[in-house]
Amino acid sequence: MSTAVHEPFDALLAGRGGHLHRDDGVVVAMDTNRWRATAGAADGWVLDRCRGPVVDLGCGPGRLVAALTGRGVPALGVDHSPVAHVLCRRRGAPMVRRDVFDPLPGEAAWSHVLLVDGNIGVGGDPVRLLARAAALLAPGGTVLVETGPHPGEWWCGTARPCADGALGDPVPWACVGADALRTVAPWAGLRVADVAVAAGRCFAELVAA
């Protein structure tokens, strides 16, 4: 099965390396090697908090889904990319190819929703995305978010994926730091319960407000 490029992030998922070029001139590095590798030490902060069924929004190649299923935790990846679909199948990671805002299996029944590897930026509207994540949760569930490295950052706009030096089409995107997340989470019916830094990456755990 081929990994032909169709979606804006397919070239990055295919392991070609690259960046996001934001419309404000900021260049954001994309760690595609980490995406395609097995789950690492920093991912442990997220994985250790998953004690019930998990849905990973924007799962990419499926490393977190594979790690969770390997621990005996039911998990499902969601990604619109055909390349992600191929890579998840190769890895044996359960996945549905769908937009995160489309109807999904297990609506309002997931113990945990993941937004990792910058996926808080998907769609360019973090409040809408967080509200979508909250709607997927069972009572008492959590949303686990990887935030940006700058705590106060709040940026929404468009960004162009760049792989092999070639710029893709602009897509809506956002970048959110942990302090900014504390401010906006209540607009989505959530609150930040915990924040941590692991191996230079920043994470937050959100619960119902």
Image: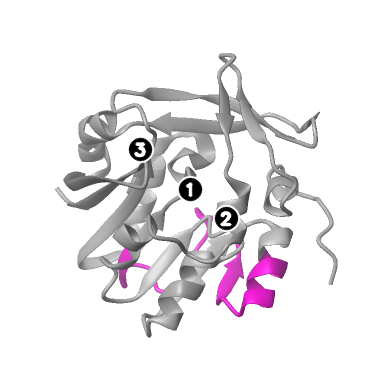
Q: Which residue is mark 1?
A: 117
In space, the residues marked 1 and 3 are separated at their CA atoms by: 17 Å
Q: Nearer the viewer, residue 201 or 64?
A: 201
Q: Secondary structure at mark 3?
A: helix
- Asked if marks 2 and 1 touch (Cβ < 8 Å), the reply is yes
Location of mark 2 (residue): 35
Place of residue 69 in the rendered image (x, y in percent of width and height, measured from the top left): 44, 80
**In this rendering, is residue 159 above or below 88?**
above
Horizontal and vertical percent for residue 3?
81, 61
Residue corresponding to mark 3 = 127
Q: Quadrant of residue 82?
A: bottom right
Viewer-side label of 1, 3: 1
Q: Earlier in the sequence, mark 3 or mark 2?
A: 2
Q: Which badge, 2 or 1, is on the more N-terminal residue? A: 2
Name the residue type under label 1.
Asp
Q: Is residue 99 left or right of residue 72?
A: right
Q: Give, as a three-letter code, the residue at label 2.
A: Trp
Residue beneath the point at 51% across and 42% down: 122
| Place of residue 14 in the rendered image (x, y in percent of width and height, measured from the top left) | 74, 54
Q: Is residue 195 above or below residue 134?
A: above
Q: CA distance from mark 3 to mark 2?
A: 24 Å
- Indicate the secondary structure of the residue bearing disc 2: helix
Q: Is residue 50 above or below residue 149?
A: below
Type of amino acid at the residue the image marks with label 3: Val
- Residue shown at 43%/51% (left/top)? 116
Disc 3 vs disc 2: Cβ atoms closer than 8 Å?
A: no
The answer to whether residue 105 is seen in the rendering is no
Of residues 68 and 114, the one nearer the viewer is 68
Q: Tell me, yes or no, whether the highlighted magenta stretch contains residue 101.
A: yes
Question: Tag 3 or tag 1, which sits nearer the N-term?
Answer: 1
Specify the segment rendered in magenta. 85-112
